[in-house]
Image (spheres, rainbow, N blue to C red):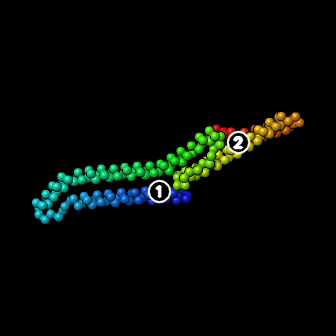
Amino acid sequence: MSTKTAQFGQLKVVGKISLWFSLVAACGLLAIFLIVDDSSTTYLDAMQSMSMTHKNLPWVMLVGGLFLVLGTGITTWLITLYSSFRVAGPIFRFTANLEQGLKVGEVPLIKVRHDDYLQDESQTLQITVKELYGYYQGLETQVDQAINALESPEADEQQLREAIQHLVTATDKAIVDD
């Protein structure tokens, strides 16, 4: 599953949660309309209805508003929690694999769940680790050749210069100018 498919799936979940919450809010609005009785036929009935509405509407609005705030808070919390696991999980995996690599001496293959974010970053990190190990292997080869050239009794000055030049060239790749 690609990153875009996973993100679309998450948008569908967010959309469903939002639609359900909107439906509940609409039901609350309908309840307010049902509480407000405007079916009075006489002036006295109309005044009693207005008086009851005036008396009860603030409490209904307060309860409805608190319900909406609570629902919005819970919905936001759930969306944030769900989304943060899709970012925090890969970051934790990157960290754990790199720490294990420092202890063992070789970084294991860095994989994240197929529906997590940071898929591109995971692939980039894997490529970087492979290139770093390739660089170390090449550098080790250059050092071994330089040592062999130094220890060889028949090595001439030209061979020593070439071995050292190869070593300098290999180490220059690692130096980054500021």
> Relative to 144, is 86 above or below?
below
Query: Which quadrant would residue 166 be assigned to in this image?
Result: top right
Q: Position of residue 125 (x, y in %)?
A: 61, 47
Q: Amino acid at mark 1?
A: Gln
Which quarter of the rendering shows the N terminus?
A: bottom right
- Expressed as whole percent of the image width and height from the top left, the position of residue 47 reads 13, 58
In the rendered view of the protein, which quadrant contains the C terminus?
A: top right
Q: Which residue is mark 2?
A: 136
- Left or right of 139 on screen, residue 46: left
Tag 2's secondary structure?
helix
- On the picture, is 67 further left or further right than 79? left
**Residue projecting furthest to the front:** 104
Q: Judge by depth and name the residue closer to the eye, 115 or 45.
A: 115
Q: Could one spot residue 160 in this view of the protein?
A: no
Task: Indicate the secondary structure of the residue bearing disc 1.
Answer: helix
Q: Is residue 55 above or below residue 153?
A: below
Q: Report how many numbered discs are placed on residues in the image.
A: 2
Could you tell me if the residues under marks 2 and 1 are in contact, i.e. CB atoms within 8 Å? no
The circle drawn on residue 10 is 1
User: Can you give x and y, in whole percent of width and height, for residue 152 in the image?
Assistant: 85, 36
Disc 1 crowd rating (10 Å Cα; few below 14, some 14-19, many 20+) is some
Residue, x 32% and y 57% (percent of image)?
A: 25
First along the sequence among labels 2 and 1:
1
Residue type at tag 2:
Tyr
What residue is at 74 percent from the left and 43 percent from the top? 138
Q: Quadrant of residue 46?
A: bottom left
Query: What residue sits 64% from the left and 49% below the top?
Result: 127
Q: CA distance from mark 2 to mark 1?
A: 41 Å
